[in-house]
Image (cartoon, helix red, strand yellow):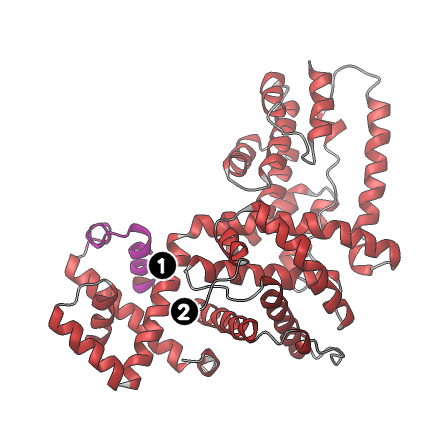
């Protein structure tokens, strides 16, 4: 993927990561109408579209912030596929009416398929990561929060009144515990590891 | 994986492995699929924790900003939809229109006597929280109480919501209004100032509410000071200008 040329639309990804109001507004103006139409034609309304679009944008933001998103296709195709997949999943869950239109033919762009799929996986991962974090004991939670907030492990150790060596070891083991919880989850197999 | 493996993962990510250990580590990544899988998960977890915890403030600002832009974009669309086919979900727009008429009438009637009063300006639009969160009783309780001007009850419901979602700026803003309504000015000051000094699109709304709070406390000079900072083109600019003229 790294050899492929970045698409000019990477500006939307970077703009989201920077919380650039101008870019976010542009995304709504340019790309939302098509998604609203699609959802309205498939058992939804504008409120559903509003939620789907907002959640999708937050996922893209999270992925972009972790520097894990390099757009090699038009944003339009990528974004549409993501919103569409999210909406279809919701319909499936709520057992609403059958979907009538399948627009996949619109986007033969392989990169858009691959990238939007990766973002969906990213979203599943993040949801599961958040879920398992809540299962940790308080000692691990506090240590991890301090670790990632304070940065310097020396200061973390000082703030928790433990030794530097112990703080480091404990951090590794806490994330190790999360790793095991992730692997043991029934949702693990859809994360594509 | 053994404890030692996780300690190695961490050391690798921190760049703390010695040259020899690094070679051995990379060899094992290639030859041991389980080791590799566990490492990939560990690495993603690490990156996710770093993002969520270290960028907490930025994520909060982003979501608030997105919320405002989304509402701005969709309000026009929802309005259109209501004209075309009435949507039972969004009756509140009708009330909003009715409320606006009442506000206008209010201006004409009250303006005949003396200086401006808080009560001429506190006709807040009904809030709508249940569209997106259908099953949450706190949200519907908050919405109903607020719209029925039962602000004490609304504050209790807002607090319950904020317990789970303390970064919810929209709720904080409504809570600010309810606090002013119930004369809890000090707490209102804290809530509204926090929103006002943040980098989100709610900040101008917070200014307007705070200006009204000072108006209610007969602190004209502070009210004027804040009103002057509400920029042109924002939702409350016209009302702010009108109030400014009356106060001057």
Residues at marks 2 and 1, CA–CA distance in whole angstroms = 27 Å
Q: Quadrant of residue A39?
A: bottom right
Residue stretch rendered in magenta on the structure: A140-161
Residue that numbered label 2 is attached to = A3
Residue depicted at x 71% and y 26%: B118
Q: Chain of mark 2?
A: A
Report whether A26 appears left or right of A38: left
Please tell me whether residue B209 is drawn above or below residue B174 in the rendered image: above
Label number found at residue B10: none
Q: Position of residue B71 (x, y in %)?
A: 67, 50
Tell me which residue sits at (57%, 59%) in the image. Answer: A57
Q: Nearer the viewer, residue B100 or A76?
A: A76
Dot 2 lies on which element?
Answer: loop
Residue B157 appears in view: no
Same chain for mark 2 and mark 1? The answer is no
Image marks 2 and 1: residues in contact by CB distance under 8 Å? no
Q: Judge the density around disc 1: few (<14), some (14-19), many (≥20) Cα neighbours within 10 Å.
A: some
Q: Is residue B11 above or below residue B170?
A: below
Which element type, helix, strand or loop, lies under badge 1? helix
Tag on residue B50? 1
- Number of numbered labels in the structure image: 2
**Which percent across, then down, holds residue B119?**
74, 28
The quadrant of the picture occupied by the C terminus of chain A is bottom left
Report the chain holding disc 1.
Answer: B
Please, what is the dominant secondary structure of the magenta stretch?
A: helix
- For marks 2 and 1, give the one nearer the viewer: 2
The x and y percentages for residue B18 are 13, 68
């Amino acid at each position: 993927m790294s050899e492929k040329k970045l698409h000019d639309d990477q500006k939307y990804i970077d703009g989201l990561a920077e919380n650039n109001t101008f870019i976010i507004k542009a995304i709504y103006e340019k790309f939302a109408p098509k998604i609203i139409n699609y959802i309205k034609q498939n058992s939804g309304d504008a409120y559903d579209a509003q939620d789907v679009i907002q959640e999708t944008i937050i996922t893209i933001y999270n992925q972009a912030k972790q520097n894990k998103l390099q757009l090699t296709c038009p944003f339009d195709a990528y974004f549409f596929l993501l919103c569409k997949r999210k909406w279809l999943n919701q319909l499936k869950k709520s057992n609403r009416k059958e979907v009538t239109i399948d627009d996949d033919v619109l986007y033969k762009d392989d990169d858009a398929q691959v990238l939007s799929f990766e973002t969906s996986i990213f979203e599943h991962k993040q949801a599961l990561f958040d879920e398992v974090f809540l299962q940790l004991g308080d000692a691990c939670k506090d240590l991890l929060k301090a670790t990632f907030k304070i940065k310097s492990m020396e200061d973390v150790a000082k703030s928790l009144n433990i030794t530097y060596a112990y703080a480091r070891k404990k951090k590794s083991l806490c994330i190790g515990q999360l790793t095991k919880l992730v692997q043991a989850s029934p949702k693990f197999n859809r994360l594509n590891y | 994986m053994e404890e030692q493996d996780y300690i190695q993962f961490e050391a690798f990510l921190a760049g703390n492995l010695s040259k020899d250990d690094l070679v051995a580590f990379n060899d094992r990544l290639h030859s041991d699929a389980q080791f590799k899988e566990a490492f990939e998960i560990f690495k993603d977890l690490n990156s996710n924790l770093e993002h969520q915890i270290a960028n907490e403030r930025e994520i909060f600002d982003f979501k608030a900003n997105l919320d405002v832009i989304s509402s701005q974009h969709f309000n026009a669309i929802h309005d259109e939809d209501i004209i075309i086919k009435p949507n039972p979900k969004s009756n509140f727009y009708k009330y909003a229109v009715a409320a606006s008429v009442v506000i206008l009438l209010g201006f004409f009637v009250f303006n005949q006597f003396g200086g401006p009063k808080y009560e001429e300006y506190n006709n807040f639009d009904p809030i709508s929280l249940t569209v997106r969160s259908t099953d949450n009783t706190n949200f519907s309780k908050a919405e109903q109480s607020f719209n029925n001007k039962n602000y004490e009850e609304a504050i209790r419901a807002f607090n319950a919501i904020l317990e789970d979602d303390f970064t919810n700026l929209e709720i904080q803003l409504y809570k600010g209004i309810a606090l002013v309504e119930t004369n809890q000015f000090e707490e209102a000051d804290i809530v509204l100032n926090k929103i006002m000094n943040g980098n989100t699109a709610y900040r101008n709304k917070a200014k307007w509410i705070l200006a009204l709070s000072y108006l209610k406390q007969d602190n004209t000079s502070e009210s004027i000071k804040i009103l002057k900072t509400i920029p042109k083109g924002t939702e409350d600019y016209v009302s702010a200008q009108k109030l400014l003229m009356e106060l001057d």
